[in-house]
Amino acid sequence: MSKWVSGGMDTATTFFDGFVPEMWTEGVRYYFRSNLVLGNLATDWSDVVAGGGDIVHIPRINEQAASTLAQAAKIGWTANTTAEGKDDLVIDTHAYSAMLLEDVATIQASDDLMAKYSNEMGYALAKSIDTKLEAALSGTSNVLALGNTAGNDKFSKADFGTIVSALAGADVDYLSGNVVMVLKPNLYSSLFELDEFARADVIGNGLASPRYSGFVGKLLGIPVYVSTQVDTGTAGGTTEVFGYVFDKSALNIAFSKQPRLQEQYDIDYLGTKVVTDCLYGTKLIGGTGTNTKRAWKITNAA
């Protein structure tokens, strides 16, 4: 409990020491999660490194063959002589957001002001993580080129067929709920020119779901998300990337340290230094190869 002394309230007690960490930590974590788009869509392996470690080994199991058993015949056993592969997710990024808050007592007395700072710090972490995940997706060699001419940032009905053909050809069930589409804002806006996306009598209640972390509706039964982090390549050129289609198993993330907040009072500046940070790594699986495709990038026409 704080106490009143000559000149005002005495803040040299444990009152403010306990107040800041509890409220700020929860605020940062809340906004961190709500602002993540790609991070919330990735497969999270954080539990694997909860007890320590900096590499997550994700095993690959080779495709198995089936045989026909004749009546009264024995099963033919074949030894597994092919080495199983693995993908390594390396936790190598330490992200942080820091600021110096002067007159901390004033800030502590205002929940609204604290929420605004929490929002900004959480968003800063989320943006840096989404940027790294988008960079991983952009490395895929699987390309879906829009049928329009270069520089015409619009979806057409024919493009829907291109997407379905690519997914079905790779044995990816696009109606499973695990496949998502993340688009650049300008390409997403072009969907409203198509009845298949915008008209309620065509899509039913597909847009009735509340918007959460970039979710804006469904296309071909695939959940569609919008992210400003999708911004690579030369604008108007054939290398411009408008979005991605991927199975959630393709995009992987692991936190060895979840977002935390630390604070320290600095008497030189008569303010409190506040920093929030996290330690994580990412890995894209199925971005290359013929039989293991799980992720595609949507580009301008070649």
Image (tube, rainbow, N blue to C red):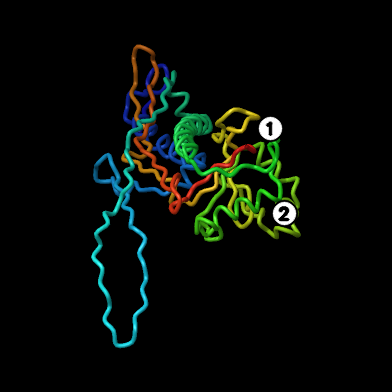
Q: In the image, residue 258 lies at what x, y percent?
A: 36, 40
Residue in the image at 49% along x and 52% along y: 247
Q: Which of these two is toward me, 212 or 10? A: 212
Q: Which of these two is toward me, 252 or 84? A: 84
Classify residue 71 as left or right of residue 168. left
> Could you tell me how far apart the alpha carbons at marks 1 and 2 are, in whole angstroms?
23 Å
Mark 1 vs mark 2, foreground winner is 1
Residue in the image at 46% along x and 32% along y: 128
Mark 1 highlights which residue? 151
Residue type beneath disc 2: Glu
Q: In the image, residue 77 lies at what x, y percent?
A: 25, 72
Residue type beneath disc 1: Gly
Mark 2 highlights which residue? 196
Label 1 SS: loop
Q: Taking 116 as reference, is 245 above or below it?
A: below
Crowd tier of the residue under label 1, counting other residues whose Cα lies within 10 Å: few below 14, some 14–19, many 20 or above: some
Could you say which quadrant of the image residue 150 lies in?
top right
Could you say which quadrant of the image residue 276 lies in?
top left
Classify residue 69 as left or right of residue 296. left
Q: Which of these two is toward me, 238 or 197? A: 238
Q: Which of these two is toward me, 267 or 159? A: 159
